[in-house]
Amino acid sequence: QVQMQESGPGLVKPSETLSLTCAVSGASISSTNCFWGWIRQSPGKALEWIGSIYKSGSTYYNPSLKSRITISADTSKNQFSLNLASVTAADTAVYFCVRGVSTPYACGMWGQGTVVTVSS
Amino acid sequence: EIVLTQSPGSLSLSPGEGATLSCRASQIVTNNYLAWFQQKTGQAPRLLIYGASNRDVGIPDRFSGSGSGTDFTFTISRLEPEDFAVYYCQQYGSSPGTFGQGTKLEIK
């Protein structure tokens, strides 16, 4: 059974870089034909697709965030990461790691989510 | 970017009743790559329907989806107490993937 668990600091200062990691168990991110990605949900708001990475290393980013995002994978640890630079209060959200098939924007399986607050 | 508009914004119904939710896209959804999710308070969304009409593994058959192109419908045939939650549609056929604003299903 595939499980995903997000980790990272719960508090980030404005203008700094938000860094999160998603540890995957039950499947190999380097061999499974899946996309591994990130979605966020701001307080009281709907969901926003951030981006994803494929086993080949190809990345797919939301154009609205593209200039600030890096998604990478560490196959030796079977985990993937999100870096979001120059954060502001608008980046405060619950961040979910997800797994999808068929397209880079699919999200059939979700981690439990981690709360990130941007504040000084 | 495809904008998804869900209606109604909220719905008050009683257990045993049926529910019908709508999701309208601003452009044609590629390959009808339209999914429906259920989210309960404090939990991650859960995939119910993918490809507009396919139930995910383990999803009860009281949940169903239909539609194509720009107009999609999600139906719960007979509401169980655990079905009261927020429901989101998502298109995953083109970049960026986008979600509707959600429909809150409340107990009457």
Image (spheres, rainbow, N blue to C red):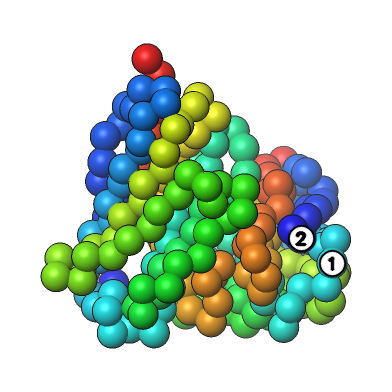
Name, please, the residue furthest toward the top.
A120
Is A77 on the left-hand or right-hand side of B82? left
Q: At 22% from the left edge and 65% from the top edge, which residue is drawn?
A: A74
Q: Quadrant of residue A17?
A: top left
Q: Position of residue A27 (x, y in %)?
A: 25, 77
Q: Chain of mark 2?
A: B
User: Where is A37 relative to A96, above or below?
Assistant: below
Q: Nearer the viewer, residue B102 or A85?
A: A85
Label 2, secondary structure: give it. loop
Task: Name the quadrant of the N terminus of chain A.
Answer: bottom left
User: Where is B27 relative to A50, above or below?
Assistant: below
Q: CA distance from mark 1 to mark 2?
A: 6 Å
Task: Name the quadrant of the C terminus of chain A.
Answer: top left
Q: Position of residue B27 (x, y in %)?
A: 84, 67
Mark 1 crowd level (few <14, some 14–19, many ≥20, 10 Å Cα): few
Is B11 on the left-hand or right-hand side of B87? right
Are the residues at dot 1 and dot 2 in contact (C-beta closer than 8 Å)? yes
Q: Earlier in the sequence, mark 1 or mark 2?
A: 2
Is B67 on the left-hand or right-hand side of A19? right
Name, please, the residue furthest toward the left.
A76
Q: Badge 2 is on which residue?
A: B2
Q: Position of residue A42 (x, y in %)?
A: 54, 36
Q: At 76% from the left edge and 60% from the top edge, which residue is drawn?
A: B2
Q: Badge 1 is on which residue?
A: B27
Question: Do tags 1 and 2 sit on the same chain?
Answer: yes
Name, please, the residue furthest toward the front.
A67
